[in-house]
């Protein structure tokens, strides 16, 4: 049952509780309901609209687009999900996180417009943010797709440039169990005659076919844009634009040049409307930040935070770990939701972890710590006779798991916190950090 309707005096926390109670399902894909309410709200975005989807890399690509456009002097709105610590993180205007009052004002408008239409938490939030952006006099908006593409609430927006960063197996209950099915869903953020950037090195045929069928202007990695680099710097090459002598992005990790080149291809594709000087690219890449994506905290022992929660992201994380210097032992604070491919993630990380600290996560999709520990043990490779295999322990929550890892880790060791946004957020909160 929905809670009683909030009003202007209700704090943001009360509104969020109300939103959670509004719809019988947490995820209910489809554009009919959210599109009807958007029409009643009269939402119009005059800005250049970037819509970014993909299995992994979309958050990083959004962060780089925002940072570069801000450095170029444009007014920019950024919508991402989920948040790590505070709900307000989901919307930024000109680099500033939206205030409680701004959200409450928009929630009131959506509530008044929806009438008897039932909206999910994500749909309600999306409409509120789009209305917020429509009133802010922006030059550009960067919108991250929540789940999939075709039926995601963000897809009510017609992108001036759509980006699909990668296509891999995740959310298979909703999107399908093959890359071809998932690629089909993600390709539906493309629009006829508009730039459609795909930075997946091996895009599914379904994505290529849909782009061709609707007449999108498809930009493919290696064919239409690429990057090259050495130890000191890197360069972007597009259809007509070249960006030489770039410093490496502030965002760490093996795939960040791929994400950066997707962002630069998107900007090249709309350069007639949003010209971006080279210096803005340089500054933006150095200023882009995204908590929880191979984020390394200062101090000893080293703490690495990564929200990797599917095998594709775990494979990138494993590569990033391999590229680091020597650490005697790696301790992993690990928490995953029950509907994720836990065995696939553990298999990709493989033998890089010496000690596993398995943490329970809250909510209906949370997994009990001992059940998670059992799945980790089952997924680990068999230890050769006479050798010592990795240890696996269970803890009630990520904070307790992290405390145990800190107590056990030597000064030269590293602690990896990964498996879910919830896992990373809980440890950041325990450390008193805001991301």
Image (tube, helix red, strand yellow):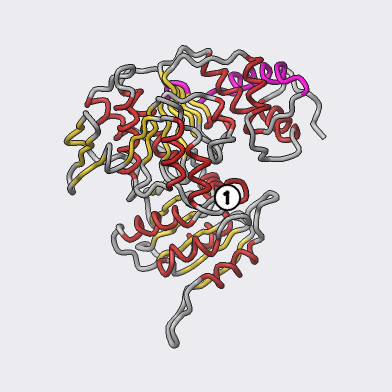
Residue 271 image offset from top left, x and y in percent:
30, 21
Judged from the image, the secondary structure of the residue bearing numbered disc 1 is loop
- Residue occupied by mark 1: 176
Residue 376 image offset from top left, x and y in percent:
55, 67
Residue sitting nearer the eye, 305 or 323: 323
Vertical comparison of 103 with 392: above or below: above
Q: Classify residue 285 by image quadrant.
A: top left
Residue 310 image offset from top left, x and y in percent:
50, 54
Q: The magenta stretch spans which residues?
A: 93-116
Residue 98 lies in the magenta-colored region = yes
Query: Outermost residue toward the bottom?
Result: 386
Q: Classify residue 239 by image quadrant.
A: top left
Left or right: 213, with 261 as reference point: right
Q: What's the magenta bit mostly, secondary-structure-wise?
A: helix
Q: Identify the residue at image location x=74%, y=18%.
A: 7
Q: Classify residue 283 by image quadrant.
A: top left
Within 10 angstroms of label 1, few (less than 14), some, or many (20 or more) residues? some
* Number of numbered markers: 1
Q: Identify the residue at image location x=49%, y=14%.
A: 136
């Amino acid at each position: 049952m929905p809670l009683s309707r909030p009003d202007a005096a209700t704090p943001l926390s009360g509104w969020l509780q109300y939103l959670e109670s509004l719809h019988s399902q947490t995820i209910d894909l489809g554009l009919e309901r959210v599109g009807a309410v958007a029409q009643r709200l009269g939402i119009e975005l005059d800005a250049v609209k970037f819509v970014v989807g993909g299995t992994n890399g979309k958050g990083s690509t959004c962060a780089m687009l925002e940072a570069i456009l801000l450095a170029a002097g444009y007014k920019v709105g950024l919508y991402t999900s989920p948040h790590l610590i505070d709900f307000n993180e989901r919307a930024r205007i000109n680099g500033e996180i939206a205030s409680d009052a701004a959200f409450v004002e928009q929630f009131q408008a959506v509530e008044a417009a929806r009438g008897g239409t039932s909206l999910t938490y994500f749909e309600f939030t999306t409409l509120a943010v789009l209305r917020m952006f429509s009133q802010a006099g922006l030059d550009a908006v960067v919108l991250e797709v929540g789940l999939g593409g075709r039926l995601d609430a963000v897809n009510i927006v017609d992108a001036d440039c759509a980006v699909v960063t990668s296509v891999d197996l995740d959310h298979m209950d909703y999107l399908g169990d093959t890359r071809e099915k998932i690629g089909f869903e993600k390709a539906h953020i493309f629009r006829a005659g508009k730039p459609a950037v795909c930075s997946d090195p091996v895009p599914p045929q379904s994505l290529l076919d849909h782009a061709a069928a609707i007449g999108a202007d498809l930009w493919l990695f290696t064919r239409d844009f690429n990057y090259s680099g050495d130890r000191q710097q890197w360069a972007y090459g597009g259809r007509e634009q070249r960006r030489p002598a770039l410093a490496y992005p502030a965002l760490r990790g093996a795939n960040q040049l791929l994400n950066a080149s997707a962002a630069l291809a998107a900007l090249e594709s709309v350069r007639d409307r949003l010209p971006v000087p080279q210096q803005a690219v340089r500054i933006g890449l150095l200023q882009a930040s995204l908590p929880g994506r191979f984020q390394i905290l200062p101090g000893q022992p080293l703490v690495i935070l990564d929200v990797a929660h599917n095998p594709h992201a775990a494979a990138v994380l494993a590569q990033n770990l391999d590229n680091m210097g020597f650490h005697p032992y790696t301790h992993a604070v690990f928490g995953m939701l029950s509907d994720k491919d836990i065995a696939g993630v553990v298999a990709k990380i493989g033998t890089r972890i010496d000690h596993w600290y398995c943490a329970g996560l809250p909510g209906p999709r949370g997994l009990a710590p001992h059940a998670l520990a059992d799945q980790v043990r089952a997924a680990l490779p068999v230890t050769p006779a006479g050798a010592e295999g990795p240890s696996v322990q269970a803890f009630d929550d990520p904070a307790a798991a992290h405390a145990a890892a800190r107590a056990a880790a030597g000064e030269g060791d590293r602690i990896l916190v990964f498996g879910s946004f919830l896992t990373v957020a809980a440890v950041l909160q325990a450390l008193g950090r805001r991301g």
